[in-house]
Image (spheres, grey):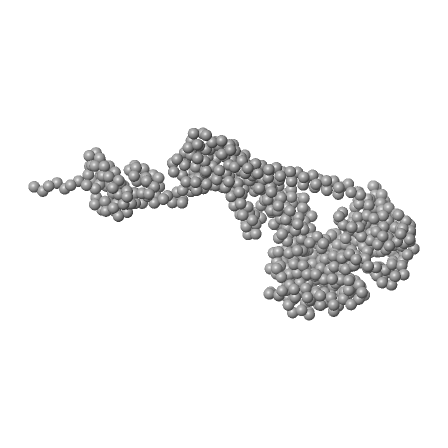
């Protein structure tokens, strides 16, 4: 008789277990599996018992989830008996626990989230503004090797100007091979653009204040411009040609297909449209919609036009230079010095000093018309950081104050085997969830506030949007901001919570002194109060400055004064217009002049006084107006009288009190009857007015003289 086959588990399963199981645990694991196998033989039969034995061994070798280990012997769950859980499994576990904790403590979570979102929203708005200001004219392909040439007039005080003599750009192009291209352009203000109606008249007329310039075809070599129609190489080579932006073509002709159409410039010159370009972006200082060929300028200046184009004494044209790749900027500096020695030969021209500024400084140098000085932008960055830091400190203080309520949770998790690193990871994930939620809310808050900021900065043409955050330049600082907030706001609370003593935590013996360092928490509170006080002080100072600007006596009347461009140079027609405006109800006075008191349209000019043969060491600002100019603006006469008539051949002049001091005269009356020679014309001083502001409030009032000439603008009160 053949003895019965012994009942036992599959040999292949035993062999796998012996190969892959930790030798220190093999005996314990096999014992548990054999006990379970024997019980199943009695209840389920040999076949089923052997099948489940093999399944459990395979499950031991290939663990994938917590459910896979259910029902296995206790020894199988020993941390040395298995491979460690995967990162995906751990992250999913941490995320689940974090969501449960945040929902359980939803009131505290909501306070943390909205507090953090408010600070982030303020920071995002400020950083978007700063990023926008720093982006001006940096989008050009040659921006890193393009330079803006400026001129300083050297007197007793250096007078900075943003322009150069007209011949400079042409000399740089022709005489220096390392100059790839150079372009000159001239701004023009208060011009009238008329659209002919084809019947000998004009269908539309527009007054254009600041977005017209005369320039050369090299403009399109130096700066990136997208063309819709026309040839950039030839569009501005001929005189009396003009290139329009897309929106201005629509404005003038109701179509962007305006090639060959005609415009009338200032009622004296016909311009033919030779090109249509895309609208200039808002982040450029060269925001021109009407580009007129530079060859048009000499003809508009009359008989002396060609001579004026070669004048090195007058500063008229903005000049930009693009260097060839690899050229050192120092070569351009040396070239400007050599050019000055070669061409600035007269006494007035020798006072000019050229400088090369990077194109990126075009918007950041207030001396030359920049509207966003770097110190102000850096101060805004600090303000934005302070706001975000204050929000993070508030988050930290709330988290550490709430830590006692989570002490038992930490104690249980430590008793179950959680390490400190795992706890820190858990709490950082909670902070990340709160931060990401706060970021979404902050973006919504920022989008609601940006229209108000755009309206406040409408004069700059800002068009900020939260969509700017997805631009490559913005993504860098925005990603760094989010990461910094997560680390700053989450790391310290996670350290505090993860170092709790599990025994003390489970017994409820933790105190507030043990919840983080007292000195650290006090320091955070002090920093938070410091930032708050700094903002309050800053707000008080700004309110005081605004109140000062509103209440400051500028030395002239500024209320209820309107300016209107004059469309004609004919004195008779101007007088007719003056009388018609004066007859309007509510109009008290009308004056014809070239500029208001605070205008800086004219650069300082040299002059000679009395019998002196050489020009004075300081320049003067010239204001042009008629005999109604002084009474309309309420300027106070200190000595002498007003102009005797409004004749443009009038040879009288009026100076301000600062000029009396600069000339070294004792009293205002000493200058009366003396001669001033300016622009080659002799003027007799008939009056002295009190000083009034012509520049920013912080600027020194310059010496000033006023005379009568052909006016360009009407003031009506």
Kindly identify the residue that appears in the image at 65 percent across and 40 percent down.
534
Q: Position of residue 600 (x, y in %)?
A: 77, 53
The N terminus sits in image quarter: top left
In the current view of this chain or complex, which residue is farthest to the top?
Answer: 508
Q: Quadrant location of residue 79?
A: top left
The C terminus sits in image quarter: top right
Near-viewer residue (139 or 146): 146
Q: Is residue 502 visible?
A: yes
Using the image, determine if residue 271 lies above or below residue 127. Answer: below
Near-viewer residue (214 or 405): 405
| 52 relative to 477 in the view: left or right | left
In the current view of this chain or complex, which residue is farthest to the left?
Answer: 1
Q: Is residue 289 visible?
A: no
Near-viewer residue (151 or 643): 151
Near-viewer residue (48 or 109): 109
Using the image, determine if residue 226 lies above or below residue 506. Answer: below
Using the image, determine if residue 601 lies above or below residue 22. Answer: below
Q: Position of residue 351 (x, y in %)?
A: 77, 62
Kindly identify the residue that appears in the image at 83 percent across and 51 percent down.
658
User: How many marks are shown on the rendered structure?
Assistant: 0
Q: Position of residue 456 (x, y in %)?
A: 67, 44
| 332 relative to 153 in the view: left or right | left
Kindly identify the residue that appears in the image at 10 percent across and 41 percent down.
3
Q: Position of residue 202 (x, y in %)?
A: 75, 54
Kindly identify the residue that appears in the image at 22 percent across and 35 percent down.
39
């Amino acid at each position: 008789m053949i003895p019965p086959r012994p009942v036992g588990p599959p040999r292949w399963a035993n062999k796998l277990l012996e190969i892959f199981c930790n030798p220190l645990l093999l005996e314990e694991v096999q014992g548990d599996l054999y006990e379970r196998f024997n019980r199943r033989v009695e209840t389920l039969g040999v076949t089923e018992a052997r099948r489940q034995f093999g399944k459990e061994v395979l499950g031991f070798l290939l663990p994938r989830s917590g459910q896979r280990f259910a029902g296995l012997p206790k020894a199988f769950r020993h941390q040395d008996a298995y491979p460690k859980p995967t990162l995906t499994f751990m992250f999913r576990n941490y995320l689940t626990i974090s969501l449960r904790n945040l929902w359980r403590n939803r009131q505290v979570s909501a306070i943390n989230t909205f507090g953090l979102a408010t600070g982030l929203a303020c920071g995002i708005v400020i950083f978007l503004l700063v990023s926008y200001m720093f982006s001006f004219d940096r989008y050009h392909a040659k921006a890193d090797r393009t330079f803006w040439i400026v001129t300083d007039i050297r007197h007793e005080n250096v007078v900075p100007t943003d322009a150069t003599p007209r011949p400079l750009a042409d000399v740089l192009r022709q005489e220096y091979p390392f100059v790839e291209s150079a372009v000159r352009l001239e701004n023009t203000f208060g011009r009238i653009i008329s659209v002919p109606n084809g019947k000998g008249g004009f269908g539309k007329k527009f007054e254009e204040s600041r977005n017209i310039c005369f320039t050369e075809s090299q403009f399109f070599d130096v700066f990136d411009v997208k063309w819709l129609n026309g040839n950039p190489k030839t569009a501005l080579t001929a005189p009396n040609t003009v290139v329009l932006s897309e929106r201005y073509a629509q404005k003038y002709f109701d179509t962007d297909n305006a090639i060959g159409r005609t415009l009338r410039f200032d009622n004296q010159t016909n311009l033919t449209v030779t090109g249509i370009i895309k609208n200039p972006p808002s982040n450029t200082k060269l925001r021109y919609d009407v580009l007129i060929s530079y060859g048009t300028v000499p003809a508009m200046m009359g008989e002396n036009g060609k001579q004026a184009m070669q004048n090195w004494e007058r500063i008229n044209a903005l000049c930009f230079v693009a260097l060839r790749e690899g050229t050192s900027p120092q070569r351009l500096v040396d070239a400007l010095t050599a050019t000055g020695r070669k061409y600035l030969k007269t006494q007035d021209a020798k006072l000019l000093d050229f400088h090369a500024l990077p194109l990126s400084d075009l918007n950041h140098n207030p001396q030359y018309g920049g509207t966003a000085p770097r110190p102000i932008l850096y101060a805004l960055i600090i303000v934005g950081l302070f706001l975000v830091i204050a929000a993070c400190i508030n988050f930290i203080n709330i988290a550490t104050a709430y830590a006692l309520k989570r002490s038992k949770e930490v104690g249980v998790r430590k008793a179950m085997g959680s390490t400190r690193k795992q706890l820190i990871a858990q709490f950082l994930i909670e902070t990340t969830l709160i931060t990401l939620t706060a970021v979404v809310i902050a973006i919504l808050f920022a989008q609601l506030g940006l229209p108000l900021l755009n309206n406040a900065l409408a004069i700059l043409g800002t068009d900020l949007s939260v969509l700017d955050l997805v631009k490559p330049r913005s993504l860098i600082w925005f990603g760094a901001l989010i990461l910094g907030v997560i680390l700053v706001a989450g790391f310290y609370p996670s350290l505090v919570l993860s170092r709790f003593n599990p025994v003390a935590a489970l017994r409820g013996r933790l105190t507030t002194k043990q919840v983080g360092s007292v000195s650290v928490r006090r320091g955070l509170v002090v920093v938070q109060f410091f930032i708050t006080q700094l903002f309050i002080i800053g707000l008080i100072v700004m309110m005081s400055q605004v109140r000062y600007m509103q209440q400051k006596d500028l030395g002239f009347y500024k209320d209820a004064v309107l300016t209107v461009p004059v469309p004609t140079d004919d004195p008779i027609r101007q007088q007719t217009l003056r009388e018609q405006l004066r007859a309007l109800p509510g109009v008290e006075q009308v004056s014809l002049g070239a500029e208001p008191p605070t205008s800086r349209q004219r650069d300082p000019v040299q002059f000679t006084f009395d019998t002196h043969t050489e020009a004075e060491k300081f320049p003067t600002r010239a204001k042009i107006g008629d005999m109604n100019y002084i009474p309309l603006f309420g300027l106070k006469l200190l000595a002498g009288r007003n102009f005797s008539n409004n004749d443009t051949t009038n040879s009288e002049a009026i100076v301000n009190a600062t000029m009396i001091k600069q000339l070294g005269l004792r009293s205002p009356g000493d200058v009366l009857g003396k001669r001033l020679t300016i622009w080659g014309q002799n003027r007799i001083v008939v009056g002295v007015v009190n000083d009034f502001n012509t520049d920013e409030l912080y600027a020194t009032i310059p010496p000033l003289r006023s005379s009568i000439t052909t006016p360009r603008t009407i003031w009506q009160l």
